[in-house]
Image (cartoon, grey):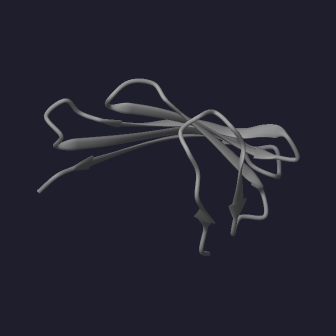
């Protein structure tokens, strides 16, 4: 599955293609290291999350919380360390 979007970090909704469960994304820069996002379908939030780069720039943490199209709730945390 290929997903594609182009957005500004201004909290406005932008089109999101490639996922039948999502049709828009809004992103807000919280501080110099963190951005939060909301994925929506027909104007309703289906996932919220954030991405944070550590102050030393060596770790990226992605957090997501949402509900699938089948109504199943999920919560994910991914941590990436720079090699």
Residue that sits furthest to the bottom in the current view? 1
From the viewer's side, name the closer residue of 47 and 24.
24
Q: In the image, is 38 to the left or to the right of 57?
A: right
Which quarter of the picture shows residue 59? top left
Instruction: Answer whether residue 73 is visible to the viewer in this image.
Output: no
61 shown above or below 20: above
Check the picture and name the quadrant holding the C terminus: bottom left
Which quarter of the picture shows residue 60? top left
From the viewer's side, name the closer residue of 64 and 11.
11
Residue 32 percent location from the top left of the image: 32, 29
Residue at 23%, 33% (x, y): give it.
54
Residue at 77%, 55% (x, y): give it.
23
Check the picture and name the quadrant holding the N terminus: bottom right
Residue 73 percent location from the top left of the image: 70, 39
1 shown above or below 15: below
Q: In the image, is 32 to the left or to the right of 49?
A: left
């Amino acid at each position: 599955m290929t997903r594609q979007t182009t957005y500004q970090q201004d909290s406005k909704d932008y089109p999101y293609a490639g996922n039948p469960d999502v049709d828009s994304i809004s992103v807000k820069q919280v501080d110099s290291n963190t951005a939060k996002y909301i994925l929506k379908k027909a104007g309703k939030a289906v996932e919220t999350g954030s991405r944070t780069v550590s102050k030393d720039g060596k770790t990226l943490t992605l957090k997501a919380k949402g509900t699938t199209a089948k109504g199943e709730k999920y919560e994910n945390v991914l941590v990436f360390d720079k090699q």
